[in-house]
Image (cartoon, grey):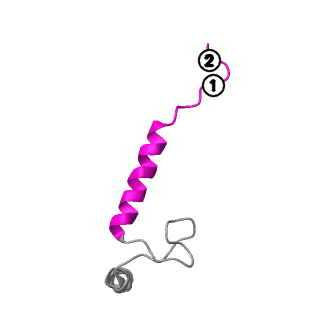
Amino acid sequence: MRAVFTVLGLVVVLAVVGVLAKKQLSAGVAPPVAGVAGGPGGAAATPQQQVQQFQKAAEAAMQQARPMPDDAK
């Protein structure tokens, strides 16, 4: 009987998560985030612009030199 309630609980949780995910995806864009282009007071960035911003940030992070330890010679 405990297994039935466990499975039923998991199904309910998955249904709730599915409904919430569907609502988020149907909105079309992510909510504006402070520090991102178009943050508070500006237009929200489109998903394509967000991907481009992430790619640029990742490339910039990859170009930075790795800090060397103090004891390296």
Please report contact status of discs 2 and 1: CB closer than 8 Å, yes or no.
Answer: yes
The residue shown at (43%, 48%) is 58
Q: Position of residue 71 (x, y in %)?
A: 66, 18
Amino acid type of disc 1?
Pro
Q: Identify which residue, 17 or 24, lies in the foreground.
A: 24
The stretch in magenta equals 47-73
> Mark 2 — residue?
72
As helix, strand or loop, the secondary structure at mark 1 comes to loop
Q: Position of residue 13 (x, y in %)?
A: 39, 82
Crowd class of label 2 (few under 14; some 14 to 19; many from 20; radius 10 Å): few
Quadrant placement of the N terminus: bottom left
Name of the residue lying farthest toward the top: 73
> Mark 1 — residue?
69
The residue shown at (46%, 51%) is 57
Quadrant placement of the C terminus: top right
Tell whether position 42 is magenta.
no
Name of the residue lying farthest toward the right: 70
Q: Identify which residue, 35 or 24, lies in the foreground.
A: 35
As helix, strand or loop, the secondary structure at mark 2 comes to loop
The residue shown at (63%, 25%) is 69
Q: Position of residue 43 (x, y in %)?
A: 46, 77
